[in-house]
Image: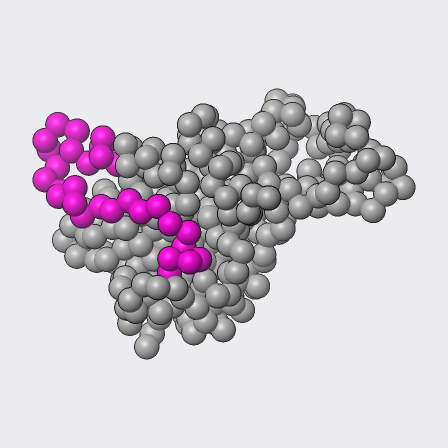
Amino acid sequence: MISRKAAIARQFNCSAAGLYDTHAHVQRTMADMLADILIKQTNADNSNNLSLLEIGCGTGILTEILVNRWPHSSITALDIAPAMLLAAEQRVLSTANPAGSNDRPLSDIRFLLADVEKWAANMPVSSFDLIVSSACFQWLSQPQQTLNYLYRLLRPEGILAFSTFGPDTFHELHTAFEEVYRAENMVPQRHGLSFQSANQWIDSLTTAGFSNIQYQCTPLTEEYASPRDFLLSVKAVGASTSEAVASRSLGSRRLFTSLYKEYEDRFSTPEGVAATYDIVLIQASKTQ
């Protein structure tokens, strides 16, 4: 049986080769929001020689921002999906020196295929000044252990900053699913990932040793032509993993036909239907 991480990597490989960037509007917004926080908090100018680690670089949306903001720093961009890494490398290298106008050594950027939950355990301590991640930490199998590792990897006064999704993400979808299950006198199942709250992340960061923890939660509402278009968009960015178990008494076609109707009845907008993204941004420091 294929492992969870292998399944995730396969999903994102398909997404990178497909329409990821076409549908990654929210992911792009999250990267921009995270970059704004990093610029304000680090007070770095273009001459800073920092060692940066990006976890889950995807197709390079945030990586490109990091390269442009800190052109003289060393950047390690890590991802679990080979196709994502290739897309990120192509994006960054195509913009780093488009017409000979940027003298940044390309060797300063390293793209690495790895699962951070295993990779970080074996890296030398105090390796990075800044660790960043956008729209990735929700995929961690062992978030507390991984945060412990990342704390070790940071140098004193180093910063960890990440964006992820909060528990109110896709509340419309989960509400519609619950109503469908209840109408069938069945126990509701969770379709999609379960997301940690900001307070849960803060507790884990504190346990790992981080301090000066700051956060913000920002709801973002997107509109889609139909519930089906919404789910296809989610699938296109590789986020179609579900915790639900298929039911013999309620077939997939019947389930989703009922879901689409319930979703439209409850969450219609003039443009189609609404979907909420609960964006959580967190930054923390290593003060020792």
Residue at left offset 42%, top offset 27%: 17
181 vs 281: above or below:
above
273 vs 208: above or below:
above
Residue occupying the far bottom of the picture? 288
Q: Please tell me in which quadrant of the rendered image residue 283 appears.
A: bottom left
Residue at left offset 28%, top offset 72%: 156
Drawn side of residue 42 relative to residue 221, left or right:
left
**Which of 7/223 is in front?**
7
Residue 99 belongs to magenta span: yes
* Quadrant occupied by the C terminus: bottom left
Residues in magenta, as a range: 92-120
Q: How is colour applied across the structure in the image? A: one colour
Drawn side of residue 178 relative to residue 137, left or right:
right
Rendered location of residue 260, percent (x, y)? 73, 27
**Which of 71/212 is in front?**
71
**Which of 44/64 is in front?**
64
Residue 170 belongs to magenta span: no
Drawn side of residue 51 relative to residue 61, left or right:
left
Rendered location of residue 44, percent (x, y)? 23, 56
* Quadrant occupied by the N terminus: top right
Asked if residue 262 can be seen in this view, the reply is no
55 vs 200: above or below:
above
Residue occupying the far right of the picture? 185
Rendered location of residue 9, percent (x, y)? 47, 41
Residue at left offset 51%, top offset 54%: 140
Residue at left offset 24%, top offset 47%: 110
**Which of 268/152 is in front?**
152
Rendered location of residue 153, percent (x, y)? 33, 65
